[in-house]
Amino acid sequence: MKRKQQIAYNEILSDVAITAVTILMVLLGVADILPVNRFVLFGGGILAPRTAALHQTLSVVVGCVLLFISYRLYKRVRMAYYITVCLLPLSALLHLYDATSRWPLLPVVVIELLMEAVLLLLHRHFTRHADPITLRRGALFALLCVALVLLNTGVGLFVMRHHFHGIATVWDAVYQSLRLFVLMDISGASPKGLRGLIFLRSAVVLYWASLAAAVLFILKPLVYQPIVSARDHARVRELLRKYGYNSLSYVDVEQDKRYYFGQTIEGFIAYVIEADTAVCVGDPICREEDCAVMLLEFRQFCKQNDLSICFCQASEDWLEIYKGMGFGAAKCGEEAAFELASYNIDGPKTAKVRRDVRSAARKGITVEEYRPQLARNAALEQEIWTVSQEWLSQKKSGELSFLLGSVGLDDPLDRRYFLARDHSGQVCAFVVFLPYVDGYYADVTRHRRGTPAGVMESITLTAFDTFRREGVRWGSMGVAPLANTRTDTQSTRVATLLAYVFEHANGFYAFKSLYQYKKKYNPTLWKPHYFIYYPAKFTPQLSYALIKAQNRGGVQDFLFNRLCHLLARLFRVKHR
């Protein structure tokens, strides 16, 4: 017990120390950027004017970098640690030259050396890998980089206005700073002497450096990462054909996923990171005999990155392997699965399906398959896109992701598209099916407003019949979330909570109606699916991560839109 308390105490001290270092880094970064060229401003010092210009340029660059990576250092990213450890001595050296003429900077040098010592002592705490830069984040970094250099130059021109002709106000300094950035011409600011000339030349160097950094931030997600992503997606697609047993597996090809590839075995795990949790799709993609090794590798990877783990909609087939590896498990729903060779809609349990299909046929509904891999039809794809947009406009929230695929017509890959036309020949609904080993899964289902009953049933049954004739064994309508969770014997506490949500939270998500819709098809069997999590404790943080991973607009969007939907429904009921 004492050893555990000591470890916890050490962890708290480490967190405090790293937080303090991060705060000091931010302050140092601001100090290096805003006090524009101390030698130029105050005169004196031991450096020659041209050397002072280099000093000024390096100070601003170091300050910008410290600001950019401070958050990554706080999040224990190892690359940020390496960069900081290299930059702090350089920053101390730059401040040491300042201190030779202005003694108050000596404490700054001491603080930087102490920060360096603390980081070296805590090097084992920095284990996270850097996140890839998205285009949105790259553009934000680019704008911030340019803005900091513009601010530095503008403040410097105003404070040093007695070194230039025609700069008397803040607006003069701002105008000349922008003009200098656009034209890269120092003659417009009309320096009076050598110090003003040196400042302008250092500003030009900084402008070019900021532009180069901006281009790098923007081009990396546009050029480098797509090349790496295309290579990884090709590898993922190949492995899915071999080991994609979970019906949900093919959503791994969606662009929002990250991949951990096995180091010693063939396979991968697809995941997203939300709330310090690696939320994974389905099961690991590998051979069953390699599953334990894959889980062990991934668990070590997540430990290094200080991440919890949650596999969402994992199958029952590997449940004992998960439990043997120390993972917790809680039933999250049941999958409607159909053995196509024997499945039919005869009998009383599917009477409603038969009735709806016949009704749709009487109204002139026809179903066909569109194979964009064989021949593209731009007009038809435009109709599909229009149906999709109309369907999304009716939803309570934005388009869900993570466990759902996309329409994917920009890159169809192995998707199968089945669509329905009304009596006028217009596309009124479609379903996108995703492949998995021995089967196809009905993933994206969308229809127009006012589409008659029986259309979606007609599409689904036509697709199942097509797959059966091709020799495909299984069809799947996916998991009915939270269905029959009370039967869970793995985690009765979580099962009780999820069952309550299933019964009482249908205003936020149509759990019951989705289950009833799938049940009316009378599936061959219902396959239990599970949340698998590590550490083996289902926490509020885990729930938050699951909601955020599923909803692209974030938890706030999820709650706001569903509350609006509830209020609108109450208002309609009140005024009937």
Image: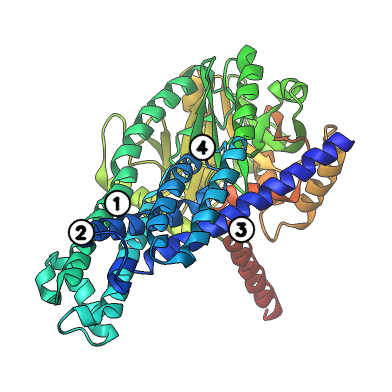
Q: Secondary structure at mark 3?
A: helix
Of pointers 2 and 4, the one earlier in the residue sequence: 2
Q: Earlier in the sequence, mark 1 or mark 3?
A: 1
Q: Which residue is mark 1?
A: 213
Quarter of the rendering occupied by the N terminus: top right
Dot 1 falls on a residue whose secondary structure is helix
Q: Residues within 10 Å of mark 2 (few under 14, many from 20)?
A: some
Give, as a three-letter code, the residue at label 2: Arg
Q: Residue at x 83, y 37 (%)?
A: 4
Q: Residues within 10 Å of mark 4 (few under 14, many from 20)?
A: some
Q: Mark 2 against mark 3, which lies toward the viewer?
A: 2
Q: Give whichever of 576, 315 is nearer the camera.
A: 315
Along the horizontal axis of the image, is 396 left or right of 412? right
Q: Is residue 229 above or below residue 513?
A: above
Q: CA distance from mark 1 to mark 3?
A: 33 Å
Q: Secondary structure at mark 2?
A: helix
Query: x and y percent of residue 213 in the render?
Result: 29, 51
Residue bearing the label numbered 3: 555
Q: Residues within 10 Å of mark 3 (few under 14, many from 20)?
A: some
Looking at the picture, the colour scheme in use is: rainbow
The nearer-to-camera label among 1 and 3 is 1
